[in-house]
Image: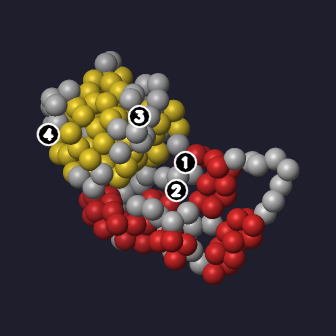
Amino acid sequence: MSDDELFDLEPDALELAASIATLRTERDPGRALRDRLLASTRTTSRFGDLEREVASLLDLDVRAAAALLLRVDQADAWTEGPAPGVRLFHVEGGPAVAGAVTGFVRVEAGREFPEHEHLGDERVLVIQGALRDSLGTVVQRGEMAPMPAGSAHRFEAIGPLPLVYLVVVRDGVRIGDDVIGPDDPRG
């Protein structure tokens, strides 16, 4: 845990983190368990610098966007996606995005999101990692990628981290013969 992350913890969470750090056990439970435990005590997201952009894209206030960003690191928020290594986290946006598919998408490093057509305008905000689409465009953390209705592409998560992005796409997407629309529980 970095010094910056320690300053983001509430006093009770900081005390808990200090207690955990001093525990000695016969068998080390591993870094993954430690990271999950510490993440569960967070009251601010590691994506805090993107809260305003997320709020704007989803037509939500910043507090609601911050709460959604906290859930990005929770495994139970995600469901299986349309391809291996792809997971989806559906979120509800405000009135300005009614009729749009809204949510986060996670693509494991080196995996590909399949070819798909945008049935309406799409806006993507990368919050972790980077992608390279079939047109050669690279989009990195903090960058926005708009795609017009009727456009189609596929993309790959590049770099060492899983790609995580927020998507708002009007009317949905078509992947092969399958349409994921605004009323689809997957979207």
Mark 2 and mark 1 residues within 8 Å of each other at the beta carbon: yes
Give how far apart the Cα atoms at labels 3 and 1 are.
19 Å
Please identify, in this view, whether the residue under mark 2 or under mark 3 is nearer the observer.
3
Q: Which residue is mark 1?
A: 77
Disc 4 is placed on an element classified as: loop
Give how far apart the Cα atoms at labels 2 and 1 are.
7 Å
Mark 4 neighbour class, 10 Å CA radius: few under 14, some 14 to 19, many 20 or more: some
Location of residue 52 with respect to 136 vertically, above or below? below
Going 21% across and 39% down the picture, which residue do you hit? Answer: 138
Please identify, in this view, whether the residue under mark 4 or under mark 3 is nearer the observer.
3
Residue 41: percent from the left, percent from the top? 63, 66
Mark 1 and mark 4 residues within 8 Å of each other at the beta carbon: no
Mark 2 / mark 1, whichever is N-terminal = 2
Q: Which residue is mark 3?
A: 109
Which residue is outermost to the right? Answer: 26
Disc 1 is placed on an element classified as: helix
Residue 121: percent from the left, percent from the top? 18, 43
Q: Which residue is mark 4?
A: 148
- Give the amino acid type for the residue marked by disc 4 in the picture: Pro
Mark 4 / mark 3, whichever is N-terminal = 3
Quadrant housing residue 122: top left
Give how far apart the Cα atoms at labels 2 and 3 are.
20 Å
Mark 2 / mark 4, whichever is N-terminal = 2
Residue 8 visible, this angle: yes
Q: Choose between 117 and 99: the one closer to the eye.
A: 117
- Give the amino acid type for the residue marked by disc 1 in the picture: Ala
Quadrant housing residue 135: top left
Mark 1 neighbour class, 10 Å CA radius: few under 14, some 14 to 19, many 20 or more: some
- Give the amino acid type for the residue marked by disc 3 in the picture: Ala
Give how far apart the Cα atoms at labels 4 and 3 are.
26 Å
Q: Which residue is mark 2?
A: 71
Going 40% across and 39% down the picture, which residue do you hit? Answer: 160
